[in-house]
Amino acid sequence: MSERIAVYPGSFDPVTLGHIDILERATLIFDKVVVAVLKNSDKTPLFSTAERVELLRQSIGDNPRVDVATFEGLTVEFAKRVGATALVRGLRVVSDFESEFQMALMNRRLAPAIHTVFLMTSFANVFISSSIIREVCSIGGNIDGLVPSASAAALRQRFGSFSEVS
Ligand code: PNS
């Protein structure tokens, strides 16, 4: 049987423990997971593409089933180029569903042979998103335990030290 390859696309600005959780679950299902960092989106990222890739690499470590890559343009076109038949997206809460459903249906219309697979994050991660992490850090709050140590170090460097968790 041919290798089952999935693409896990996202902004990863920065990678959180929620992302790592979804990635680990995906590696239990697929032979190879390509983590695909979107280069140019409408959003202005906190970390550059190279920084986001580096934080992912440090956080994932050496895993022969995982590759980290960057892409521009349509996710499904990138997925075709790497031979993937699936896109992985994490779901945390019901409010994620609407936009994820819309994106999955658009991607299916663009590339019917590529299937979106939603994986449920662990309960401990339901409230973690890169945007809330960035916001809390920017005003001095502590995000230890919510992001990999590489992301925490990069955020400290960017925003200064965090307050203590009481
Ligand atoms: O981590 P994010 O910001 O939720 O990831 C969103 C992402 C990168 C998966 C999405 O914006 C995307 O796929 N962008 C690439 C452009 C594209 O393919 N758009 C059509 C899908 S609706």
Image (cartoon, grey):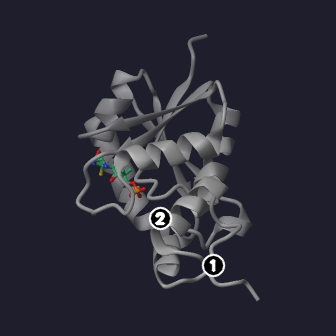
Q: Identify which amino acid the numbered label 1 is placed on.
A: Asn
Residue 142, numbered label:
1
Q: Nearer the viewer, mark 2 or mark 1?
A: 1
Residue in the picture at 35% in, 53% down: 103
Q: Is residue 69 visible?
A: yes
Q: Secondary structure at mark 1?
A: loop
Mark 2, Cα crowd under 10 Å, few <14 / some 14-19 / many 20+, is: some
Q: Is residue 119 above or below residue 28?
A: below
Q: Position of residue 20 (x, y in %)?
A: 63, 50
Q: Quadrant of the C terminus?
A: bottom right
Mark closest to the chain's N terminus, 2 or 1: 2
Q: Quadrant of the N terminus?
A: top right
Residue in the picture at 58% in, 53% down: 19
Residue in the picture at 60% in, 73% down: 127
Question: Which of 164/60 is in front?
Answer: 164
Give the residue pinned by disc 2: 97
